[in-house]
Image (cartoon, rainbow, N blue to C red):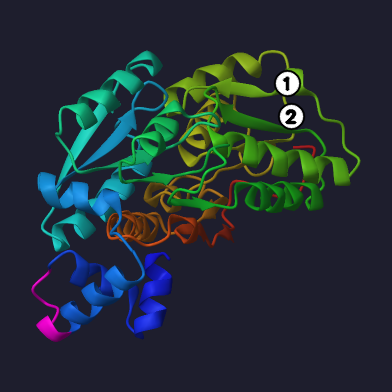
Amino acid sequence: MNIKQLAQHLGLSITTVSRALHGYDDVSEKTRARVIEAAKEFNYYPNANAQRLKIQKTRTVGLMLSTFTSGFDNPYFTEILKGVGKELSKREYNLLISLVTSKEKEMPELLRLVKGKLVDAIILVRTQRDDPRVTYLLDNEIPFVCHGRTTESRPYPWVDTDGESALYTITKRLIDLGHKEIIPVMPLTDYYYKFERLSGYLKAMQEAGLEVREEKFISCIISEEASYHHTLNYLESYVPSAFVCFSDIMAYGVVKALKEKQLTVGKSVSVTGYDSLTFSSYFEPILTTIGYDLKKSAEVMVDYLFKSIEGFPVDHLNHICEYELIIGDSDGPITNN
C-alpha cells in the first residue's frame, strides 16, 4: 500500500496523512493516532526521503545552474530564481545556488552538495537527455525536481513545456507567411528541450514539403554575444528568409547581426524566439516568441519538491506548462526587400 491508498482508505488527504506520520503539530492527536494505527495495520512505512529530510533539517535546497552553456546574466535564470526563492521563503527554507562552470564539474558539485549534507533536496535546471545527475539522485533516493525532462525511464518530479508542439507552431507560422528557408538557431549542449524543439521544427518543415539542410543549422552557447558572432559570420555566405531561435536570448544576438548587415528584421529576414523573457516585449523590434509563465513553473517545481519529500507518488508529479504564441514585429510575410 502507498500513501495515496492509505489516504483513500482513511478518507483523508495525502498531505494530512503525511503530516500525521511525520509528527507535525497541526494534526490533531486523534487523527494522528488513527493514521498511525492504519499504517501499522497495512504495513505502510513513510517515504524514506521524508525521513531523511526530517533528520537532516538543514532547511536548505540546492539549485544547480550550469553557466558554461549560458551566462548567469540570462534573464531566464532570473525568472526561475525569483519564483523558487519566493516559494521556499514561504516554507522558511533557504536557497543555495550552485554555479557549475564546466560539464566535468556537474557531478562532483552534486556529490559535494549531497554527501556534504549541505542541502536537503536538489533542483536541477536545464536537464540533458542522458543526465547522470538524475540517475544518481534516483539511485540514492535524494529528493529532487527538474525543470526539464531526460530519457530516464524511472518516474521522478519534473516541470516542462511541450517544446515539440511549440516549435511546430512557430515554425508553421513562418511557413504560412511564405518562408521556405527557415534556419534553427539552437544550443550546443545535449539539452532534452533542444531535441524536443528540433523535432517540432522538423515536423513542420517536412509536413510542408520543405528542404531541411542540417549543414545550415546554427549551434552555439546560449548567449546574445555567441549567437551574434555566429550569425554575423553566417550571413557572409548565406542569408535565409527566417531564423527560428530556441531561446529569446539567442534571438537578440541574431537580430543584432542582421541589423549590422543592414537587413530589416521582420521584412528582409524574420526572427522568432522562445521563452517570452521580460526584455522581449521592449526589444526593437518586439520579438515574436513562445511564452509561458516561468515564475509559475518555479512555483510548481517547489510544490512538487515538497510533495515528493512528504511521500506523494512521484509518477504523478509531472507538469507540462501551457504556452502561447506571442506575435511581435520581428517576423512577417516574405518579401523581396
Q: Main secondary structure of the magenta part?
A: loop
Asked if labels 1 and 2 touch by Cβ distance under 8 angstroms, the answer is: yes
**Does residue 179 show up?**
no
Front of the two marks 2 and 1 = 1
Which label was assigned to residue 183? Answer: none
Give me the residue at 37% from left, 20% from top.
Answer: 68
Task: Point out residue 209 in the picture as x, y percentages from the top left corner.
Answer: 91, 41
Query: Percent position (x, y) of residue 84?
Result: 26, 52
* Res. 47 image quadrant: bottom left
Say which of 59 and 197 sits in front: 59
Instruction: Check disc 1 and report its element: helix, strand or loop.
Output: helix
Tell me the kind of residue under disc 1.
Lys
Q: Can residue 168 be seen?
A: yes
In the figure, is residue 60 to the left or right of 319?
Answer: left
Disc 2 residue type (three-letter)? Pro
Residue 26's place in the image compared with 168, above or below, is: below
Q: Position of residue 94 (x, y in %)?
A: 13, 47
Q: In this rendering, is residue 196 above or below 310? A: above
Is the residue marked by circle 1 packed among few (<14), some (14-19), or many (20+) residues within 10 Å?
some
**Quadrant in which the N terminus appears:** bottom left
Which residues are the magenta region? 24-30
Label 2 secondary element = loop
Residues 267 and 175: in front is 175
Rendered position, 131 above or below 301: above
Q: Position of residue 327 (x, y in %)?
A: 59, 58
99 magenta-colored: no
Q: Quadrant of residue 104?
A: top left
- Mark 2 or mark 1: which comes first in sequence? 1
On residue 216, the disc is 1
Q: Is 261 or 191 nearer to us in this picture?
A: 191
Q: Which residue is mark 2?
A: 240
